[in-house]
Image (cartoon, helix red, strand yellow):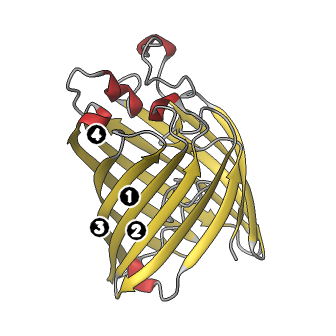
């Protein structure tokens, strides 16, 4: 989605630029490339480079449809699917300086059936000068595709450096949930409940933005079932780079 993915916040590349649907008036689109596509600290592209596109389309006042697509490079987490697509209707309002959002998010995997799943989302954002804070939650009810339920809580902070085209950002999150005994729980929680964190910097020049980001998790190698066909080994610390073009 434009608000998180590529999460970070979102948008591909991880910059946290949550834009409330109520403030959008025209469609936006961006194209991006990154050395590794990471979501909640876990690689979704098998630790390889990925290409993606994001779009946000206003539907009605306060309601927008966010779309994301990214190449998955045969990632084990998603069963070797070719492309991951996120479809997310989002409703946002401004109230007393706070930005409140709620919606749903459908994760669709092209090239492999039976892996798609859905989430309900909510977030609260606040801007103070050049700084922006967003706190959010995403809950996926129990589904066979992810071996149970999943709850993600996160906080994201970004701040532009006055007089420069540079923005610094970072955040952390916690993933938990229930498992039904199936191996697919390893898709979103390869070692069970865990923490993730990231910090980065982005430079914007006209329609081009580029950045670097450090991403890590609390998952230890001893916690992961390396024999599981759903476990991707790219869950540790990683520095990555990305570039984004917005026509």
Separation of marks 3 and 1 at Cα, in angstroms: 12 Å
Q: Decide: marks 1, 2 in contact (CB < 8 A)?
A: yes
* Residue tagged 1: 135
* Residue tagged 4: 150
Q: Residue at x 56, y 34 (%)?
A: 216
Residue 102 circle label: 3
Q: Decide: marks 3, 1 in contact (CB < 8 A)?
A: no
Along the line of sight, the residue nearer the viewer: 3 or 134: 3
- Left/right placement of residue 89 relative to residue 17 reads left
Along the line of sight, the residue nearer the viewer: 142 or 174: 142
Circle count: 4
Give the image location of residue 215, x and y in percent: 59, 39
Q: Quadrant of the C terminus?
A: bottom right
The numbered mark, 3 or 1, whose residue comes first in the sequence reads 3
Q: Residue at x 30, y 36 (%)?
A: 145
Q: Nearer the viewer, mark 1 or mark 4?
A: 4
Q: Residue at x 38, y 83 (%)?
A: 59
The numbered mark, 1 or 2, whose residue comes first in the sequence reads 2
Give the image location of residue 92, x and y in percent: 34, 76
Separation of marks 3 and 2 at Cα, in angstroms: 12 Å
Along the line of sight, the residue nearer the viewer: 66 or 16: 66
Q: Is residue 43 above or below residue 103?
A: above
Separation of marks 2 and 4 at Cα, in angstroms: 23 Å
Residue 125 circle label: 2
Separation of marks 3 and 4 at Cα, in angstroms: 17 Å
Q: Nearer the viewer, mark 3 or mark 2?
A: 3
């Amino acid at each position: 989605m434009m608000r998180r993915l590529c999460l970070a916040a979102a948008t591909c590349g991880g910059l946290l630029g949550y834009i409330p649907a109520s403030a959008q008036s025209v469609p936006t689109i961006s194209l991006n490339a990154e050395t590794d596509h990471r979501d909640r600290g876990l690689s979704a592209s098998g630790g390889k480079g990925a290409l993606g596109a994001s779009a946000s389309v206003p539907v009605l006042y306060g309601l927008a449809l966010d779309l994301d697509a990214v190449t998955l490079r045969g990632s084990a987490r998603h069963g070797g699917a070719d492309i991951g697509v996120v479809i997310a209707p989002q409703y946002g309002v401004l109230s007393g300086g706070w930005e409140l959002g709620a919606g749903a998010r459908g994760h669709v995997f092209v090239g492999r059936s039976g892996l798609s799943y859905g989430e309900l989302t909510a977030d609260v954002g606040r801007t103070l000068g050049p700084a922006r804070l967003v706190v959010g939650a995403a809950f996926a009810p129990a589904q066979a595709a992810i071996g149970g339920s999943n709850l993600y809580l996160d906080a994201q902070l970004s701040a532009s450096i006055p007089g420069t085209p540079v923005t610094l950002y970072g955040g952390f999150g916690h993933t938990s949930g229930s498992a039904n005994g199936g191996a697919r729980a390893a898709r979103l929680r390869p070692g069970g409940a865990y923490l993730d964190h990231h910090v980065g910097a982005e430079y914007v020049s006209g329609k081009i933005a580029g950045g670097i980001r450090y991403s890590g998790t609390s998952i230890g190698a001893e916690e992961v079932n390396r024999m599981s066909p759903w476990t991707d080994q790219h869950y540790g610390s990683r520095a990555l780079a990305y570039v984004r073009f917005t026509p």
